Image (cartoon, rainbow, N blue to C red):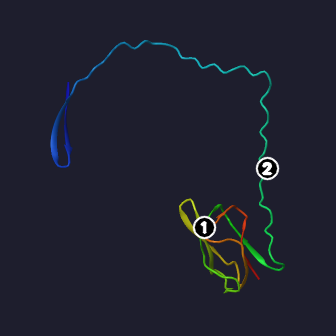
Amino acid sequence: MKTYIIHVNGQRYEVTVEEKSSGTGIPGVIAVLAPALSSPPASPVAPTPVTPPPAQGPAGANTITAPMPGKVVAVKVKMGTPVKQGDVLIVLEAMKMENEIVAPGAGTVKEIYVSEGASVNVGEPLVAII
């Protein structure tokens, strides 16, 4: 038997532990066999990159698209609103985090494609700025 002294939350405890050895272990050999291959393994195929379809918007407009799938929490602009670079256009929730989608440059909001509560996918148009 072994005796240990343990302190928990300022209290001292004396614990006695009995050692137990079964001694019934059986020595043995473990072998791992790989299945025989009837043909050589196929070479890996490179994944095909998926590109979202180009956003369609009014002629001459800069269409801002969703950078990730998520839910539109807030639309911070209205049609006709002038915006400057860095202004928040949309708040998009993805993976329990709110992400601000900002204007890439100055312009006027020409079109709003989403509303609050809408679910969007990557590449889906959100706002068009001219």
Q: Distance between the residues labelled 1 and 2?
A: 32 Å
Image quarter of residue 101:
bottom right
Residue at 71% of width from left, 86% of height from top?
A: 80
- In the image, 43 versus 27, the foreground residue is 43
Give the image location of residue 114, x and y in percent: 68, 71
Kind of residue indicated by mark 1 = Gly
Q: How crowded is mark 2: few (under 14 residues within 10 Å), some or many (20 or more)?
A: few
Residue 130 position (above or below residue 26): below
Kind of residue indicated by mark 2 = Thr
Residue at 43% of width from left, 12% of height from top?
A: 26
In this picture, residue 31 sits left or right of residue 130: left
Residue at 30% of width from left, 18% of height from top?
A: 21
Residue 48's label in the rendered image is 2
Q: Is mark 1 on a helix, strand or loop?
A: loop
Residue at 78% of width from left, 58% of height from top?
A: 51
Give the image location of residue 73, x and y in percent: 58, 69
Image quarter of residue 52:
bottom right
Mark 1 / mark 2, whichever is N-terminal: 2
State the residue position of label 1.
117
Q: Residues within 10 Å of mark 1 (few under 14, many from 20)?
A: some
Give the image location of residue 55, x and y in percent: 78, 68
Image quarter of residue 121:
bottom right
- In the image, 97 versus 24, the foreground residue is 97
